[in-house]
Amino acid sequence: MEKQCDICGKLLPATKEYFYGNKSNGSDYLYPRCKVCHKGRVKGWQKDNREEHLEYKRNSWRKNKRKYLEYAKKRRLSNPSSKIASNMRSRMWHVLKGASKSKPTMELLGCSIDRL
Ligand SMILES: [Zn+2]
């Protein structure tokens, strides 16, 4: 059985020696282009569209920023250890905030107690 490459038009044996196959679905599916053309095409596309590709990546980040952040938030909530870490951080922050606030009060109190 032969297979024609849809890029160079060569008739080649329809085997995995000449065509890349798709192993994931377990069938004998082979790509419509030969290995040589497939390689050349991927390489050429990456070279020609490098800027475009980068721009696409940038755009997709911008577009999905909220999604990514929401996902990160969800992960924080579903991951107990990071939740504890987050809780600890906020508790520490409160303690520090409380301590810095209570110190002048204590000094004030101590001063007034001495006076009394
Ligand atoms: Zn070809």
Image (cartoon, grey):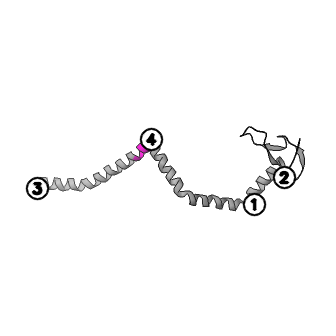
Distance of label 4 from label 1 (alpha carbons): 45 Å
Query: Residue 57's image quarter?
Result: bottom right
| Main SS category, magenta section | helix
The first of marks 3 and 4 along the sequence is 4
The first of marks 4 and 2 along the sequence is 2
Distance of label 2 from label 1 (alpha carbons): 21 Å
Residue 81: image tag: 4
* Along the viewing direction, whichever of 66 and 85 lies nearer the viewer: 66
The first of marks 2 and 1 along the sequence is 2
Q: Which residue is mark 1?
A: 48
Disc 3 marks which amino acid? Arg
Query: Residue 101's image quarter?
Result: bottom left
Disc 4 marks which amino acid? Ser
Residues at circles 4 and 2 in contact by the CB criterion of under 8 Å: no
Magenta stretch bounds: 80-86
Q: What is the secondary structure assignment of the residue under circle 4? A: helix
Q: Which residue is mark 2?
A: 6
Residue at x-position 57% and y-position 60%? 63
- Compared with 98, 62 (above or below) is below
Disc 2 marks which amino acid? Asp
Residues at circles 3 and 1 in contact by the CB criterion of under 8 Å: no
